[in-house]
Image (spheres, helix red, strand yellow):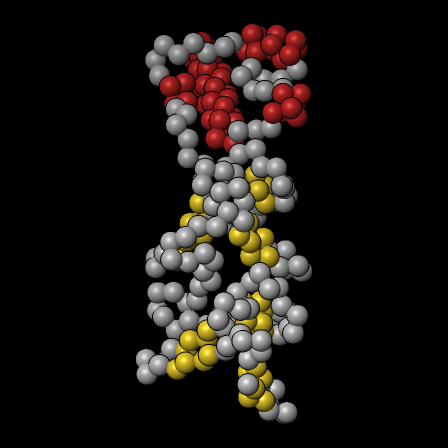
Amino acid sequence: ASVITTNGNLHLDSKNGKATYINHYSSGNTYLNTNAGTVAIGTSNPDLNAGLHIYRDRYTIYGPNSTWSAYLQVGGNGRQTTNASVLTTNGNLHLDSKNGKATYINHYSSGNSYLNTNGGNVGIGTTDPKSKLAVNGQIRATEVKVLTDISVPDYVFEEGYKLRTLKETKEFIAKEKHLPEIPSATEIGKNGIDLGDMNMRLLKKIEELTLYQIELLERMEKLESKTK
């Protein structure tokens, strides 16, 4: 059985006992049943292992719902697939779930998106991420906030803080070729920099430098008082 148009390009064929049904309901829904066959859009040679095979260089999904503008669901009805992928060959988008490791991207009505890799790591520009987020390349942002539990070194200004003398600092620099408590170039080259920790270390050095300046000011004031 066939419903064919020559110019309108509509072909509904039933061959070898494989029935094709298109049912329209009053709710506005349309249901297509291929009797366990494959539905192909844009190709006459579909992947017979797929329920729906779309061959097209561009896909657009519109959704008028105020909460969800559009969505694509793979493995519905609460079922989880072990080897699911959403791939593009030129767009370089790959969302893969392999060996039972699920990848979820959830969008919330507040405008936030949440990525859960089921305890795994996320890599951008790398296929071997060593941390929760690994980026091999440049990162641009208008603001970066580092949350840290490292104590702010304002204790430098507390009474009783033992400030290293300038002579001691000079001797340390002559021997080690870097500031005390600051990693060397070799260490940084090997281990990188922890931004939160390094900022606190640099802040401590600035505060200590301020104490040196205050100490110098006090000595100058004493000399001026003696000359009067």
Q: Quadrant of the N terminus?
A: bottom right
Q: Looking at the picture, does residue 108 appear above or below residue 66? A: above
In the rendered image, residue 187, in percent from the top left (x then y), is placed at 63, 21
Q: Quadrant of the C terminus?
A: top left
Frontmost residue, 114 versus 104: 104
Whether residue 213 can be seen here: no
Q: Looking at the picture, does residue 212 appear above or below residue 5? A: above
Residue depicted at 58% across the width and 69% down the height: 54
Frontmost residue, 222 versus 86: 86
Residue depicted at 44% across the width and 66% down the height: 70
Whether residue 67 can be seen here: yes
Q: In this view, does 190 lie to the left or right of 72?
A: right
Residue depicted at 56% across the width and 15% down the height: 180
In the rendered image, residue 74, in percent from the top left (x then y), is placed at 47, 58
Q: Quadrant of residue 148?
A: top left
Frontmost residue, 159 versus 71: 71
Q: Quadrant of residue 149?
A: top left
Residue depicted at 41% across the width and 52% down the height: 79
In the rendered image, residue 164, in percent from the top left (x then y), is placed at 50, 10
Q: Is residue 199 left or right of residue 93?
A: left
In the rendered image, residue 38, in percent from the top left (x then y), is placed at 55, 68
Frontmost residue, 53 versus 123: 53
Q: In which quarter of the image is residue 39?
A: bottom right
